[in-house]
Image (cartoon, rainbow, N blue to C red):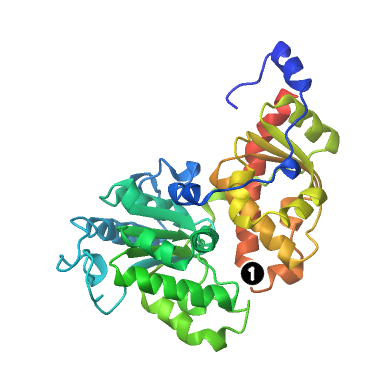
């Protein structure tokens, strides 16, 4: 919100109850899943020129230069046979038989170094109509397969010039086989790939399941990418003050009633509700929200709940929805065992993003 409402407006707003995430059970039709495979609102306007590399981290500048070359190599016709060879040495036109070697680029680095910014910039810079390039998170891609079926997903995406996959993670063996097969089909059809992750391609699945049993599939995935390592600190908190302390429950409740388009939910009830909604629908769960207000935030009780919360945090961050909360600080959401386990990078990313959204939400307390 750019300004606080007048006293009259606040009175009118206060008469209406806030929205509730727990009351929402979104249904997302398959055609919407395909249509929404574009960079989310937070990254709609980003470009390579708006990425500010850390001068002390040369890998960031090198990544920008490499991705600019990658985008330039994706120009030209996307037709069967022939085609010039672009960045990374693969043909940019569809070929009956894919050439050997990496067919995409993989951005590896810690949370907050700007990988999603760069991935979205690549999508924007690729010289193709929006309908010929797709952008989605890993969970959104796997859900697309569930909604359309494997063959229809292959057919739908095979005509694309580029597929960008954000937050690439393999959490179970089924995903490993599914994604390995899907990406193989798309590469054979001439689709270029780009992905971000906090885990090197050869380490995907490590600490989550018996990755050694699926080593062939994991190594097959790694062979499709050239890895660009991006070092650096979390830009979201670089040079900024410490995260704001949680507010009182009364203050959060007042702000929810005083803010048009805000939701108000108890944190334990929200966690229970998330278990009834597929994570691929969490974006739709937040449609139209101007703010999320939560009372009684406490450490999450188990890993399944924690992973659902990570996805919700990602969708709120993508959509720039501030989060105002009472209870424990966000850096105490995940226990020590979780922060030392196989999903630790996901949890640190969620803490980073929720902290940024909590900082954005401080302005809401001035309108109550």
**Farthest residue toward the top?**
8
Using the rendered image of the protein, determine whether residue 177 is visible from the camera's viewpoint.
Answer: yes
Residue 59 is drawn in which quadrant? bottom left
Q: Position of residue 21 (x, y in %)?
A: 72, 42
| Image side of residue 199 versus residue 297, left or right | left
Q: Position of residue 335 (x, y in %)?
A: 77, 65
Using the rendered image of the protein, determine whether residue 53 is visible from the camera's viewpoint.
Answer: no
- Give the class, few, some or many, for how many residues have Cα within 10 Å of label 1's Cα (few <14, many ≥20): some
Q: Assign the N terminus to one quadrant of the image.
A: top right
Would you place residue 272 above or below residue 218 in this image? Answer: above
| Image side of residue 141 versus residue 249, left or right | left
Could you tell me which residue is drawn at 62 percent across and 78 percent down? Answer: 207
| Image side of residue 204 versus residue 73, left or right | right
| Image side of residue 254 versus residue 43, left or right | right
Q: Secondary structure at mark 1?
A: loop
Q: Assign the C terminus to one quadrant of the image.
A: top right
Could you tell me which residue is drawn at 60 percent across and 39 percent down? Answer: 287
Could you tell me which residue is drawn at 56 percent across and 88 percent down? Answer: 213
* Residue for badge 1: 343
Q: Position of residue 70 (x, y in %)?
A: 28, 60
Q: Position of residue 138 (x, y in %)?
A: 51, 62
Could you tell me which residue is drawn at 73 percent across and 57 percent down? Answer: 275
Instruction: Count the labels in the image.
Output: 1
Residue 98 is drawn in which quadrant? bottom left
């Amino acid at each position: 919100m750019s300004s606080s409402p007048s006293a009259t407006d606040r009175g009118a707003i206060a008469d209406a109850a806030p929205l509730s995430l727990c009351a929402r059970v979104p249904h997302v039709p398959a055609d919407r899943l395909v249509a929404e495979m574009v960079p989310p609102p937070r990254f709609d306007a980003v470009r390579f020129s708006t990425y500010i590399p850390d001068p002390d981290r040369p890998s960031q500048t090198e990544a920008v230069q490499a991705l600019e070359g990658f985008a330039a190599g994706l120009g030209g016709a996307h037709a069967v046979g022939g085609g010039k060879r672009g960045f990374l040495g693969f043909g940019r036109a569809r070929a009956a038989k894919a050439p050997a070697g990496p067919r995409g680029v993989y951005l590896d680095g810690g949370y907050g170094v700007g990988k999603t910014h760069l991935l979205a910039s690549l999508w924007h810079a690729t010289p193709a109509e929006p309908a010929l390039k797709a952008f989605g998170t890993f969970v959104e891609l796997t859900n697309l397969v569930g909604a359309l079926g494997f063959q229809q997903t292959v057919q739908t995406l095979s005509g694309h010039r580029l597929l960008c996959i954000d937050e690439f993670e393999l959490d179970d063996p089924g995903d490993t086989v599914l994604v390995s097969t899907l990406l193989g089909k798309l590469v054979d059809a001439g689709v270029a790939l780009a992905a971000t992750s906090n885990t090197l391609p050869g380490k995907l699945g490590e600490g989550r399941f018996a990755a050694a049993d699926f080593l062939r599939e994991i190594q097959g995935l790694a062979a499709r990418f050239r890895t660009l390592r991006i070092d650096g600190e979390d830009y979201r908190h670089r040079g900024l003050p410490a995260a704001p302390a949680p507010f009182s429950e009364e203050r959060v409740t007042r702000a929810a009633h005083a803010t048009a388009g805000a939701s108000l939910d108890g944190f334990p009830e929200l966690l229970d509700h998330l278990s009834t909604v597929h994570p691929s629908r969490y974006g739709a769960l937040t449609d139209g929200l101007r703010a999320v207000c939560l009372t009684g935030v406490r450490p999450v009780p188990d890993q399944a709940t924690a992973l659902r919360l990570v996805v919700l945090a990602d969708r709120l961050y993508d959509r720039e929805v501030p989060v105002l909360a009472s209870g424990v600080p966000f850096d105490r959401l995940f226990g020590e065992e979780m922060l030392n386990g196989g999903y630790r990078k996901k949890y640190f990313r969620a803490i980073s993003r929720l902290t940024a959204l909590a900082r954005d939400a401080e302005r809401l307390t001035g309108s109550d």
